[in-house]
Image: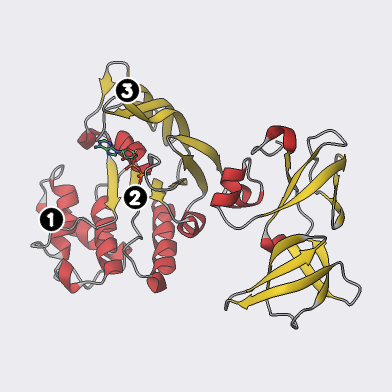
Amino acid sequence: MAALDVKNLTCSYNGKAILDDLSLQVGENEIMCLLGASGCGKTTLLKAIAGLMPISQGEIHIHGQQMNGEGVAWVPERRNIGMIFQDYALFPHLNVAKNVAFGLQCKETNKAFIKKRVAEVLELVNLGELGNRYPHQLSGGQQQRVAIARAMIGQPQLMLLDEPFSNIDTQVRMRLISEIRDLLKGQGISAIFVTHSKEEAFAFSDRMALFQTGHIEQVGRPQALYQQPQSRFVADFLGLANYVPATVIDASTVLTPMGPIASEAAINAEPGTSGQLMLRPRQIQLSLTEQGNGRVIEQQFLGTHTRCVVECQSLHLEVSTNDPLPAVSQVNINIQPHALTFFPESQGQKAVA
Ligand SMILES: Nc1ncnc2c1ncn2[C@@H]1O[C@H](COP(=O)(O)OP(=O)(O)OP(=O)(O)O)[C@@H](O)[C@H]1O
C-alpha cells in the first residue's frame, strides 16, 4: 500500500487552477522530493496533503485511508502528519524540551510519558544535552533539529518538509540532509520534501517529482531524471546539457559530427530520424592527442572539477574534467558508454521513450 496516493488532484485559488489533474504516489518509507521553480505549486500540494488547503477535484489517500474526495475532507489534526518548515516555527518563549513536548501535548496527558518521549527524540536528533536551551541560543541547524524532533514525537505516518534546509548555511547543509535522511529511514517514516534546489533534491530523495506550473513533468530516481530526462525542460532544469545534432543509424547507434556513438539501451526511433543527442558534461571524456577531433578553447578550474569548452566541427561542448588540461590542447572526444537520450526533431522538446 502506498504511503500517499494523490489522484487527479485539482486545487485553485480564486477560481484559477494552481494544480491541474495532478497524480502522485509515495511508497512506504520512501522520501519523495517535489522540485520546481518558485510559484509552480509545490507548497500548494503540500498544504492540500496536510488538509490546510481545500481541493477542487480529485482524491488524497494516506496509507489507504481517504482524506479528501467526494464528501470527504479530514481536518489536519486527524491526518497524523508531521510538518517541518523553512523558518523552523519554534516557540521563542519555550525551551527546547517544551517545544518538542508541544508536538505530543495535544494527544497525550501522561506527563511522565511525555518526558520520556521528549528525551528519546532529542537523543535521536543529537540534542540530548540541549533540552534547557532556548531557540535563540541554538544554531540554525540545531533549531531545525528541534523542529524535526517536535514533528517526530507524535510518530507521524507521513512527514511533510517545506524547504527545511534553505536557512541552513551551506557548510552544514549536506551533513544535516544526510542526518535527517538517515533518521527518517531509521524510523520508517515516509516523507515529502519541497525544494527548489536540485542539489538538495538529489541528496535527500529516493525519487523526485519535477514540477512545471501546476503539473508534474517527470517522476523518478534522481539519477534517472538527470541521465534520462524525458523532456528538454527536465534536462535543462537539472543541469548543464549539450545538444548535439544526430541521426539514428540503427537501434543502438546515432551519427554525430564527432562520429558514430553507441547507446547502451535501444533507441526507439526509426533509422534516418534526425534530432538532438543530449550529453551531460561528465559524459564527454577527453584524451590529449595532436590528431584529436576537438580543441579546448576555454577552461575554468572550479575546485571540485574543471569546466572546459571544447570546439569540434563548429560545436561548442561543455565538458567537465577532474584536472585542467594544457592550454589550447588538441583532444580526442570520447563518449562515456551510457543509454543515450535522443530528442527527435519531430517530437520537439520530448525525448524518445
Ligand atoms: N493564498 C493564495 N491566494 C492566491 N494565490 C496564491 C495563494 N498562495 C499561492 N498562490 C499562488 O499559487 C501559485 C503556487 O504557489 P505555491 O506556494 O504552491 O508555489 P511554490 O512552488 O511552493 O513556490 P515557492 O518555491 O516560491 O514557495 C503561485 O502562483 C502563487 O502566487
Residue pointed to by mark 1: 112
- The residue at the point 44 percent across, 63 percent down is 178
Is residue 164 something one can see in this rendering?
yes
How far apart marks 3 and 1 lie (CA) works out to 44 Å
The label on residue 203 is: none
Q: Residue furthest top?
A: 70
Q: Amino acid at mark 2?
A: Leu
Q: Is residue 213 left or right of residue 242?
A: left
Is residue 1 something one can see in this rendering?
no
Q: Earlier in the sequence, mark 3 or mark 2?
A: 3
Q: Amino acid at mark 3?
A: Ser
Q: Earlier in the sequence, mark 3 or mark 1?
A: 3
Q: Position of residue 159 (x, y in %)?
A: 34, 46
How far apart marks 3 and 2 lie (CA) works out to 23 Å
Given this view, does label 3 or label 2 mark the residue nearer the observer? 3
Q: Residue furthest left?
A: 93
Label 3: element kind: loop
Residue nearest the observer in this picture, 333 or 134 = 333
- The residue at the point 43 percent across, 48 percent down is 37
Q: Which image quadrant: the C terminus?
A: top right
Q: Is residue 291 left or right of residue 127?
A: right
Residue pointed to by mark 2: 161
Q: Is mark 1 within 8 Å of ligand 1?
A: no
Q: Amino acid at mark 1?
A: Ala
Q: Earlier in the sequence, mark 2 or mark 1?
A: 1
At label 2, counting other C-alpha atoms closer than 10 Å, the crowd grade (few under 14, some 14-19, many 20 or more) is many
Label 1: element kind: helix
Residue pointed to by mark 3: 56
Q: Compared to 119, does 273 lie above or below?
A: above
At label 1, counting other C-alpha atoms closer than 10 Å, the crowd grade (few under 14, some 14-19, many 20 or more) is few
Q: Position of residue 207 (x, y in %)?
A: 52, 46
